[in-house]
Amino acid sequence: MRGVLFLFLVLLAGPASAARLTGLTMTPGVITIATDGRPAAASAFGLGDPDRLVIDIPAVLPARLEAPGAGSVASVRAAMFAPGVARLVITLAAPLEIASLESTPGSLVIRLRRTSAAAFAANRSRRQLRVTVAEDSFELPRDAIPPASAAVVPKPATPGSAPPPPAGTLPPATVTPPSAPPTTLPVPPAGKPGDAADTAALAPPPRRLPGVRPRGGALPLVVVDAGHGGKDVGAISIDGGYEKDVTLAVARAVAAELRRSGRVRVKLTRDDDRFIPLGGRVTIARQARADLFISIHADAAPNPMARGASVYTLSAVASDAVAARLAARENKADIIGGVNLAAIAPDVGDIMIDLSRRATTNVSVAFADVLQESLNDEVNFRSEFHHFAGFAVLKAPDVPSVLLETGYVTNRDDAALLFSDAGRRRIAAAIARAVERHLLGD
């Protein structure tokens, strides 16, 4: 009777009942329901034979939702139970209890924890659940954005040089490196025209790429972004491994390679297992005045035979159906974290592809070609290597950006490479070579 009374009170709760449930995902210990509102109340009870947890939520469910189980959960499904009440049924493989419910601007996160069989059997009666409300905020790495008050120490003036700018003024947008001394061609040795010595002495130097003028600092800066992280695990491999772990390991290895060389500065968007919204990753690159941004990912597909690496640059129109589906999936990362991209970075969320960013796009495409050449001996490619799509994480208007899919974690051969230390080191070394070649003109 009390359960019926609670449902009646829930239906009278007003705005809370207006939320719609639009998606359902499951990772070990965590169920995430995508919503377009914030359900403020819920109730739960247990059932046996088989053991199940049932959660009633004041919400509207446009269509039945299902998700495969993970960990101690066998399956999850949701459907309308009564007008204004959606019911979530969690079938258990081992006894669990509800640890917490957290409401964010875009999701309802249910966290589960292990319990004993006796405790589960004794606690089956309906009870009201407290729903905590999370703010749509996130924590950037401590060194992600330099403090605005950081002092710039001017170099001592040399005779004939311009005086240093007054204190408090901003440095110029582009730092031009010192001009190299004029090249003096060696004097050809005496001999007959056409001698080998003449040819060697007068041969042009090897062709070099143009290189990049650093936007800030003496050395160019690349920001390496490890995709996903924290509650956003990304794709799940055939053996249960997480994409977020692959991307972090590769990003760290790229940073180690570049720091060992010392020719390019490098910054990671994350150096641990944390969630950063897509807009936050773009903000890190822009605030750091990066000369290049690389977002590292790993792909997934229902077909276990799908495999191969690919690189993506930004375009308003996807180059193919696979690119469109991938961009749509990656752009939903903020939904998992409960963040609205437009609220975090409105200047990024509304960026259009127009003439003002054509130069940046061209540089991104040029780097994609260099990256393909460098990775050619280390990974297999998915048909055409370079594709185009509207990835939110590539929308910095002033930073050349690419998204690299290192392979398919749902393919056994690709997964073996991506989840091995040796394989990730090989991929990272190739990425680092491409970065140096692009930024330094090697």
Image (spheres, helix red, strand yellow):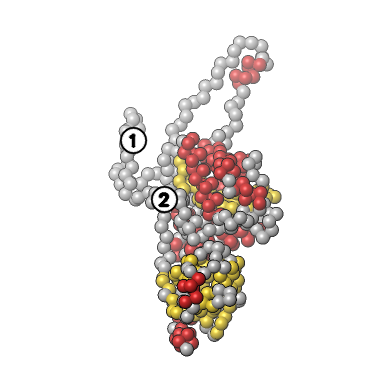
Residue 24 in view: no
In the rendered image, the vertical position of residue 41 relative to residue 29, given as above or below: below
Q: Residue at x 59, y 43 (%)?
A: 423
Which three-letter amino acid code belongs to the residue tagged 2? Ala
Residue neighbourhood size for the residue with mark 2, other residues' Cα within 10 Å, grouped as few (<14), some (14–19), many (≥20)? some
Residue 260 in view: yes
Find residue 287 and report its horizontal and vertical position in percent.
42, 51
Find residue 32 and report its horizontal and vertical position in percent.
52, 68
Which three-letter amino acid code belongs to the residue tagged 1? Lys
- Ranked by sequence position, the earlier of labels 1 and 2 is 2
- State left or right for residue 147 relative to residue 32: left
Query: Which disc number belongs to residue 155?
Result: 1
Find residue 414 and report its horizontal and vertical position in percent.
64, 49
Q: Residue at x 59, y 62 (%)?
A: 328
Quadrant for residue 47, please give it. bottom right
Q: Residue at x 47, y 68 (%)?
A: 115
Residue matched to label 2: 144
Q: Secondary structure at mark 1?
A: loop
Check the picture and name the quadrant holding the C terminus. top right
Q: Nearer the viewer, mark 1 or mark 2?
A: 2
Callouts 1 and 2 close, C-beta under 8 Å: no
Q: CA distance from mark 1 to mark 2?
A: 26 Å
Residue neighbourhood size for the residue with mark 1, other residues' Cα within 10 Å, grouped as few (<14), some (14–19), many (≥20)? few
